[in-house]
Image (tube, rainbow, N blue to C red):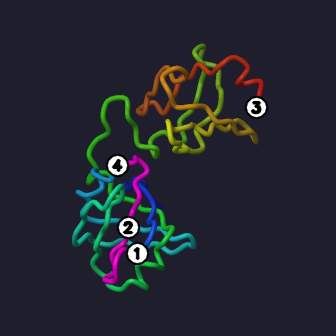
Amino acid sequence: MTEGFIEVGRVVAAHGVSGRIKVTAYSGDPAGLLRARSLRLCGETAERREYEVSTAQRAGGCAVFALKGLSTAEEAKGWAGARVFVPRQELPPPEEDEYFHADLVGCAVVDEEGAPVGWVAEVVSGPAHDWLAIRLGGEEAHLPFVAAFIREVDIERRRIVVSPPGGWLDAR
């Protein structure tokens, strides 16, 4: 459904009366989104639509987009809560030691000896840092995505090596 697209944020509201949408970026900084030439919006139902960007600007901590084909406040309000995707090639590449959440999801998680811990089901954004939601079987546990616990991230091999705190594996 989102092949070639990276989920970058959510529509938080309509902006003004001309059909613009206000998007909050998962990264916390909308600057990288402002270069997007197109967006894919995925509503809370199965609704999905791609739009060409007419204009993009920063408004506080959000990005505001005018989209071709979206021209009224009512239409824009209908997208509130929608997930926002941008074509991967339209985003700046991540900095060293930064990753797109989409690239982490599905990675195998192993400990420093190579023993399986699980796989990344989701990356949860937090106020201080992100968390990996790691699943093994029917259980899920969250591990802070910080250098103290993450030893290696190998996106090409789809593998993350972790050193969780003592007792973390037992607490699951």
Give, as a three-letter code, the residue at label 1. Answer: Ala
Q: State the residue position of label 1.
A: 14
Question: What amino acid is labelled 4 in the image?
Answer: Asp
Q: Nearer the viewer, residue 56 or 5?
A: 56
In the image, the segment drawn in magenta is: 15-28
Q: Secondary structure at mark 2?
A: strand
- Mark before the other along the chain sequence, 1 or 2: 1
Neighbourhood count class around disc 1 (C-alpha, 10 Å): few under 14, some 14–19, many 20 upward: many
Q: Secondary structure at mark 1?
A: strand
- Circles 1 and 2, Cβ within 8 Å, touching? The answer is yes
Q: CA distance from mark 1 to mark 2?
A: 6 Å
The numbered dot on residue 172 is 3
Q: Nearer the viewer, residue 14 or 148?
A: 14
Distance from disc 3 to disc 1, alpha carbons, whole Å, reads: 41 Å
Residue pointed to by mark 4 = 29
Q: CA distance from mark 2 to mark 4?
A: 13 Å
Q: Position of residue 158 (x, y in %)?
A: 48, 33
Horizontally, residue 16 falls left or right of residue 125, namely: left
Q: Amino acid at mark 3?
A: Arg
Most foreground residue, 124 or 155: 124
Mark earlier in primary sequence (3, 1): 1
Q: Position of residue 61 (x, y in %)?
A: 36, 55
Q: Residue 18, position in %: x, y?
A: 31, 83
Q: Quadrant of residue 67?
A: bottom left
The residue where tag 2 is placed is 22
